Amino acid sequence: MKAVVIHAYGGPDVLKFEDVPDPVPGNGEVLVKILATNVNPIDYKIRSGAVEGYVTLPAVLGQDLSGIVAALGNQQRRPCRRL
């Protein structure tokens, strides 16, 4: 899959568009085919190093997303949480 990855802290020039391995959902997880994402203030703070240690490098930014479920991991019964 394609992702924007940072390998070091810095300005926008540290953002690299790269091929990364396809993720595999684990127990109780879902794999989402991302259709849209955005950048939040925490993303540029991570990139700049302002919150160094918040993620392990290399890192993929942009955890806010919208998409469709593409695959299910091993489904062990877990209690359902109501929102």
Image (spheres, helix red, strand yellow):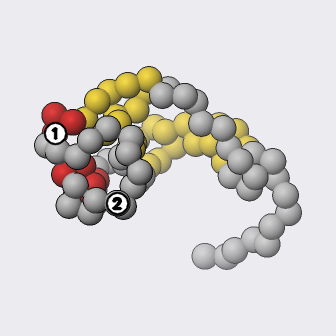
Query: Circle 1 sits in a helix, a strand or a loop, which is it?
Result: helix
In the image, what residue occupies the spot 47% across and 47% down? 66
Residue 63: where, in percent of width, then height?
42, 52
Residue that sits furthest to the top in the current view = 19
Crowd tier of the residue under label 2, counting other residues whose Cα lies within 10 Å: few below 14, some 14–19, many 20 or above: few
Query: Disc 1 versus disc 2: distance between alpha carbons?
Result: 19 Å
Q: Tell which tag, 1 or 2, sits nearer the viewer.
A: 2
Q: Is residue 41 visible?
A: no
User: Disc 1 designates what residue?
Assistant: 12
In the image, what residue occupies the spot 46% across and 37% down? 35
In the picture, measured across the screen, residue 54 lies left or right of residue 75, that is: left
Residue 45: where, in percent of width, then height?
22, 58
Q: Can residue 1 be seen in this view?
A: yes
Residues tagged 1 and 2 counted as in contact (Cβ below 8 A)? no
* Residue 56 versus residue 16 in the image, above or below: below
**Viewer-nearest residue: 48 or 37:** 48
Q: Which of marks 1 and 2 is nearer the N terminus?
A: 1
**Residue 34 - label:** none
**Viewer-nearest residue: 18 or 35:** 18
Q: In which quarter of the image is the C terminus?
A: bottom right
User: Disc 2 designates what residue?
Assistant: 53
